[in-house]
Image (cartoon, rainbow, N blue to C red):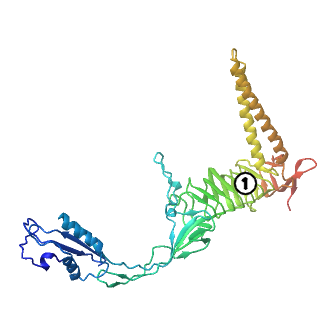
């Protein structure tokens, strides 16, 4: 620090700042540690103290060795205010150097919105469903993954002493490059497909396959993925798996709800505990199915057992030579191949082939709707027959009756249409290489065979001429 009192003597007494009667005008300087800024406090003279002068201010600045970035306009303004108004003027920036421009390599900056994708939706008025929480970041095709931050060239700086300040090369905390299933559009990195966002060794990519090395539970949340899913562990009760591709499970599958647009492959078996629901858009492969409802567009390959389950397929159910069906109901459009159907002490099974189950289900929905409409119609007719009913209410009831009758006719017409489409594959065949136990019901194109005695090694098919099922011995 330096001031007027230390640099000159005008012959006046000077006192401490606390309670002076006389004080020379002075300036104190503060140079910041980085030598890029100099700040000054200007104090007016008191009493008979020597006033500030511009020569004195220049001498003080020069004594500090400050030669670069001097802000003469700010100095003049502070000097004039201090001397004319006789008030201190403090913290005035009187010199400022040029900071260096640090070099920064080109890098990709992750879209900050993606960091919050795995957080569950929270409603303060409702309990949080932790099954909706997921550690995976799922992105849609063409979503923005990152922004390209271009290279910044370095530039040397200069401090208030006129010395050069070297620049440094920064290492940005970003992504080094892009990987598979991504593409650049101007300065933005986009996802080329829908899938899981993967960042490995600062390379960002999108995977069309989600691989879970452990189990599905609260650590993973429900699995909703647009591509293929592979699960190495088990699946906890209550968790859903919905895949836009295929699902592969390497253990037994305790299913609550699952859907695959492609194939479903389960290394163990499928257990539904009476509530499980599965939809497979491709082919099914597993060892057994127990207490489950399962709809499959292509073949259902079930090696060992189908127990108390409903299986629907638009192709065939194919089991191993020892594969057994116990209880439940099978809808297989093109037929069934099994080792055994039924047990002596087990529940009877019902096998339906040649019928498009989607048409049958729609028919049943329309039948259910007809029952509801008939009940509503009866209640309205009872109201209409009530004595003393006002004319306006009577007309309103008649209008509603007319609407119900139109709905009934529409449902009945649809049922008639569906009945003509139910028998979709008359060449369906049921082949059993072992035994079919008594109590089993087998239908092909609605022609039925109720098994009353054990059948062994038989093929059952439809005789078109008689519209009856016939059996023939397998070799």
Q: Quadrant of the C terminus?
A: bottom right
Residue 84 image point, x, y percent: 19, 65
The kind of secondary structure element at disc 1 is: strand
Quadrant of res 458? bottom right
Q: Quadrant of the N terminus?
A: bottom left
Is residue 22 positioned above or below 434 on the image? below
Q: Is residue 66 left or right of 271 when viewed as pictured?
A: left
Residue 262 image point, x, y percent: 69, 61
Q: Is residue 103 left or right of 93 when viewed as pictured?
A: right
Quadrant of res 172? bottom left
Is residue 157 positioned above or below 89 on the image? below
In the orientation shown, which residue stands out farthest toward the right? 465
Give the residue displayed 41% in from the left and 79% down from the top: 102
Give the residue displayed 46% in from the left and 45% down from the top: 125
Count of numbered labels shown in the rendering: 1
Is residue 267 positioned above or below 333 on the image? below
The residue that label 1 is drawn on is 325
Q: Is residue 93 left or right of 250 when viewed as pictured?
A: left
Answer few, some or many: residues within 10 Å of disc 1's Cα (few below 14, many 20 plus, some between 14 and 19): many
Give the residue displayed 45% in from the left and 47% down from the top: 124
Is residue 74 positioned above or below 347 on the image? below
Give the residue displayed 52% in from the left and 54% down from the top: 131
Residue 226 image point, x, y percent: 63, 61
Q: Nearer the viewer, residue 152 or 261?
A: 152
Q: Can residue 211 be seen in this view?
A: no
Q: Is residue 95 left or right of 263 when viewed as pictured?
A: left
Residue 137 image point, x, y percent: 54, 63
């Amino acid at each position: 620090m330096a001031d007027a009192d230390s640099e000159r003597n005008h012959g006046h007494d000077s006192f401490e700042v606390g309670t002076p009667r006389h004080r020379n005008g002075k300036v104190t300087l503060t140079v910041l540690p980085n030598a890029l800024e100099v700040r000054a406090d200007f104090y007016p003279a008191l009493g008979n103290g020597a006033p500030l002068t511009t020569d004195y201010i220049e001498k003080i600045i020069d004594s500090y060795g400050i030669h670069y970035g001097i802000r003469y306009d700010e100095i003049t303004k502070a000097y004039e205010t201090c001397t004319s108004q006789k008030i201190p003027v403090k913290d005035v920036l009187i010199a400022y150097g040029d900071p260096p421009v640090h070099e920064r390599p080109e890098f990709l900056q992750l879209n900050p919105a993606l960091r919050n994708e795995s957080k569950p939706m929270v409603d303060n008025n409702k309990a949080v469903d932790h099954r909706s929480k997921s550690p995976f970041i799922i992105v849609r095709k063409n979503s923005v993954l990152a922004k390209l931050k271009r290279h910044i060239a370095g530039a040397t700086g200069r401090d208030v002493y006129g010395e050069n300040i070297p620049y440094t090369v920064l290492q940005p905390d970003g992504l080094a490059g892009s990987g598979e299933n991504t593409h650049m559009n101007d300065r933005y990195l986009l996802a080329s497909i829908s899938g899981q966002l993967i960042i490995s060794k600062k390379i960002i990519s999108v995977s069309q396959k989600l691989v879970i090395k452990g189990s599905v539970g609260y650590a993973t949340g429900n699995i909703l993925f647009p591509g293929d899913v592979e699960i190495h562990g088990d699946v906890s009760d209550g968790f859903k798996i919905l895949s836009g591709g295929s699902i592969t499970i390497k253990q037994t599958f305790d299913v609550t709800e699952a859907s695959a647009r492609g194939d479903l492959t389960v290394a163990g078996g499928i257990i539904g505990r009476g509530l499980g629901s599965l939809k497979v858009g491709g082919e099914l492969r597993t060892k057994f199915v127990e207490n489950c409802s399962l709809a499959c567009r292509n073949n259902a390959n079930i090696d060992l057992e189908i127990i108390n389950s409903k299986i629907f397929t638009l192709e065939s159910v194919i089991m191993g030579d020892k594969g057994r069906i116990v209880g439940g109901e099978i809808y297989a459009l093109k037929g069934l191949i099994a080792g055994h159907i039924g047990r002596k002490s087990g529940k009877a099974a019902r096998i339906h082939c040649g019928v498009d189950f989607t048409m049958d289900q729609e028919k049943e929905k329309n039948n259910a709707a007809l029952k509801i409409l008939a009940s509503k119609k009866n209640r309205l007719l009872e109201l209409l027959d009530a004595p003393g009913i006002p004319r306006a209410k009577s007309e309103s009831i008649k209008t509603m009756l007319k609407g119900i009758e139109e709905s009934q006719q529409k449902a009945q017409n649809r049922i008639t249409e569906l009945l003509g489409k139910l028998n979709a594959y008359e060449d369906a065949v049921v082949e059993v290489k072992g035994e079919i136990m008594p109590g089993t019901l087998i239908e092909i194109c609605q022609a039925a065979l109720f098994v009353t005695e054990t059948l062994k090694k038989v093929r059952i098919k439809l005789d078109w001429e008689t519209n009856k099922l016939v059996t023939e011995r397998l070799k």
